[in-house]
Every structure is written in structure tokens, then in C-alpha cells.
Amino acid sequence: MDLLLWITIGFIIIGFIILTSMKKDMESKVAFIKANMEDEKNSSKAKSVIWWIWSTTAWGIVSMFLVVWCFHNHFG
């Protein structure tokens, strides 16, 4: 197998493990924000949740790009 395929598989698996391990923490932060709407701590917690959403989106886009690139290199 070539290096691009291993990079793609590793990126997807490692990213998935990291994102799922952070999921519970993000759920608790969202629950805290919902419960304490007027609290001053909500701003930092909301920023971390927003960054998690952005990083998850970026991980998904890069993963799709790598998969398409792998298929293009192997079958193109």
C-alpha cells in the first residue's frame, strides 16, 4: 500500500478517536450553557464548543478530500 492511503486511514481513525473522546465534554459544556444563560463563564465555554464544531467540520472536509484523492490515484 502506498503512503497516501496510510496517511488517509491514519488521519481518519485518529481524528475520529479524538473527536469522539471530546464529545462528552462538549455535551456537558452545552448543557451548562443552557442551564446558566446569564453566567459570565458561558462565553469561554461557548467559544470552545464553537471551535470544536469548526474543527470537526474541517476534519470532515479534509477526510473527504483525502479519500477522493486516494481513489483518484488508485483508479485514475
Image (tube, helix red, strand yellow):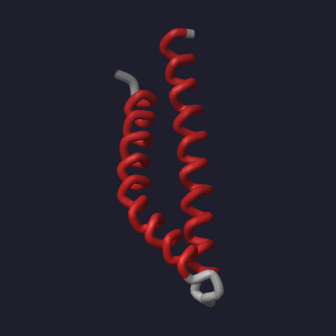
- Where residue 10 sits, quadrant-wise, is top left
State left or right for residue 3 relative to residue 61. left
Q: Where is 46 relative to 12, above or below?
A: below
Q: 57 or 9, which is in the foreground?
A: 57
Residue 20: x and y in percent read: 39, 53
| Residue 32 in the image, given as x and y percentages of width and height | 50, 77
Q: Is residue 65 above or below residue 35?
A: above
- Quadrant of the snapshot with the N terminus: top left
Q: Which residue lies furthest to the bottom in this view?
A: 40
**Residue beneath the point at 65% across and 87% down:** 38
> Residue shown at 44%/34% (left/top)?
8
Q: Which of 6 and 41 is in front in this view?
A: 41
Quadrant of the image for the C terminus?
A: top right
Q: Which residue is the extreme one toward the top?
A: 75
Q: Where is residue 42 in the image (x, y as percent from the top left)?
A: 60, 81
- Please state the horizontal and vertical placement of residue 28, each as a whole percent of the image: 44, 70
Q: Tell me what residue is drawn at x 51 percent, y 27 percent.
A: 67
Q: Is residue 52 above or below residue 33?
A: above
Q: Is residue 47 above or below residue 12?
A: below
Q: How many labels does the image show?
A: 0
Say which residue appears at 51% left-offset and 10% top-offset: 75
When asked about the image quadrant of residue 18, the answer is bottom left
Relative side of 73 to 38, left or right: left
